[in-house]
Image (cartoon, rainbow, N blue to C red):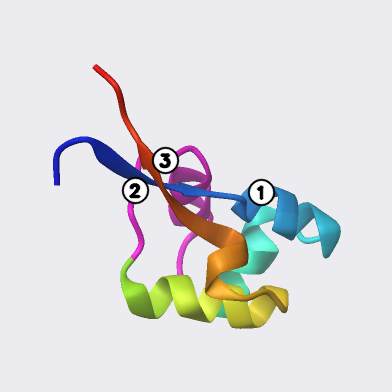
């Protein structure tokens, strides 16, 4: 989909819970690098992983992820 990207507040939500990237990764069954890549927008998580992250962080999906228009 041209013109939009998935933005996230994962880093903020993780910090609110005082979790490292590695600790969050362990909770959801991925690598620390995956969490880092999601936080920087280099990797777009599957719906299942995004929902799992929201549950583990005690947030709604909409609190963590949103669509952002990209202007070229």
User: Is residue 20 among what the camera can see?
Assistant: yes
> Which of the two labelled residues, at mark 3 and mark 1, occupies the earlier sequence position?
1
For residue 11, the mark is 1
Which region shows up in magenta? 29-45
Q: Which residue is tagged 2?
A: 43
Residue 38 is inside the magenta segment: yes
Residue ID at (42%, 40%): 41
Callout 3–callout 1 Cβ contact below 8 Å = no
Where residue 36 sits in the image (x, y, percent)?
Answer: 52, 46
Residue 35 is inside the magenta segment: yes
For residue 52, the mark is none
Q: Residues within 10 Å of mark 2 (few under 14, many from 20)?
A: few
Callout 2–callout 1 Cβ contact below 8 Å = no
Q: Nearer the viewer, residue 1 or 41?
A: 1
Q: Which of 6 and 34 is in front in this view?
A: 6
Callout 2–callout 3 Cβ contact below 8 Å = yes
Residue ID at (44%, 45%): 37
Q: Nearer the viewer, residue 66 or 42?
A: 66
Where residue 71 sits in the image (x, y, percent)?
Answer: 29, 22
For residue 41, the mark is 3
SS assignment at label 3: loop
Residue ID at (36%, 62%): 45
SS assignment at label 2: loop
Where residue 38 sits in the image (x, y, percent)?
Answer: 45, 50
Q: Quadrant of residue 20?
A: bottom right
Q: In which quarter of the image is residue 60?
A: bottom right
């Amino acid at each position: 989909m041209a013109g939009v990207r998935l933005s996230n507040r994962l880093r903020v939500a993780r910090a609110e819970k005082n979790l490292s990237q590695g600790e969050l990764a362990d909770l959801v069954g991925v690598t620390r690098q995956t969490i880092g890549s999601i936080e920087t927008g280099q990797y777009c998580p599957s719906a299942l992983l995004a929902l799992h992250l929201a549950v583990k962080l005690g947030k709604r999906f909409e609190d963590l992820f949103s669509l952002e228009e990209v202007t070229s």
